[in-house]
Amino acid sequence: MKTQDGRLYVIAGASRSGKTAWTKKQTAKARRVFAWDPEAQWCELPGWLKVTTRAQLLAATQKTGPQRVAYVAGGSLQAEFDFWAGCVMYAGRYVAPLDAIAEELADVTTPSKAPGNWGILIRRGLKRGITIWCISQRWSEADKTAVGNASDFVIFRQSSGDDVRYLARKTRVAEIEINDLVPLQFVHMDALTGKINRGKLRF
Ligand SMILES: Nc1ncnc2c1ncn2[C@@H]1O[C@H](COP(=O)(O)OP(=O)(O)OP(=O)(O)O)[C@@H](O)[C@H]1O
Ligand SMILES: [Mg+2]
């Protein structure tokens, strides 16, 4: 069966290295976007709707038109993240295609197999045309299922040698190149073709 596949971006870098700013640029023209927004950053951007309850998030997933929805959850982050992932899968599969942005995955996932709704989203969402932007400062401590399913690796400056070694092992980007990155500079590897692009964010 022919499907319109989405992409899964693994975005890695130390604090202030450029992850959120890069993702913001990449998704600027996307039609429907749902963000897991624990630091309440996306919800402050123009054109975004801030939702803070499960009921508001569910209501937003039913709408077919263009929208940008940031979920700023209270309570148990793990449980809310699982709920968000379930909503996104539903909204992408049954309502209309979308982009999903997940900020700081090391806070809500572990290196073991991705749990629950998040696992379903990253294993099956792409086939449903959902594009997923997975962000973390520390991929050596975050979700290996996302790394295993990545179509793209976007590597900014790292804060630890563990992360440098981990990312070099998972990609064709050399440790020395990752070590030499300065803030806002990145290496983007398309994991499906092996093609590597290098760049620096400008504002
Ligand atoms: N619109 C902008 N204009 C100028 N500078 C910006 C803009 N957006 C972000 N920056 C700067 O770019 C740098 C990277 O910011 P960004 O928020 O992308 O970091 P990050 O990798 O997401 O960090 P964290 O892990 O802490 O969330 C910061 O120094 C930030 O101040
Ligand atoms: Mg950020």
Image: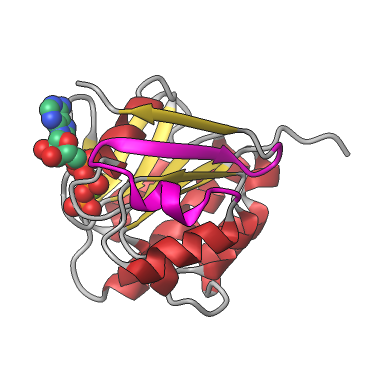
Q: In this view, does 167 lie above or below 190?
A: below
Q: Which residue lies furthest to the front in this view?
A: 176
Q: Which of 92 and 188 is in front in this view?
A: 188
Instruction: Look at 46% across and 66% down and name the residue there.
Output: 165
Image x and y of residue 73, in percent = 22, 61
Magenta highlight range: 172-193
Q: Quadrant of the N terminus?
A: top right
Instruction: Look at 40% across and 74% down and name the residue there.
Output: 141
Image x and y of residue 2, in percent = 84, 34
Q: In which quarter of the image is the C terminus?
A: top left
Q: Which of 12 and 62 is in front in this view?
A: 12
Q: In this view, does 30 lie above or below 39?
A: above
Q: Which of 83 and 62 is in front in this view?
A: 83
Image x and y of residue 138, in percent = 34, 65
Image x and y of residue 92, in percent = 56, 42
Corner quadrant of residue 163: bottom left
Query: Is 186 included in the stretch rendered in magenta?
Result: yes
The colour style of the image is secondary structure
Say whether residue 150 is left or right of residue 137: right
Query: Is 101 included in the stretch rendered in magenta?
Result: no
Asked if residue 26 can be seen in this view, the reply is: yes
Corner quadrant of residue 126: top right
Quadrant hosting ligand 1 = top left
Q: Residue furthest right?
A: 1
Say whether residue 16 is left or right of residue 97: left
Say whether residue 171 is left or right of residue 184: right
Instruction: Look at 48% across and 66% down and name the residue there.
Output: 166
Instruction: Look at 63% across and 56% down and name the residue there.
Output: 149
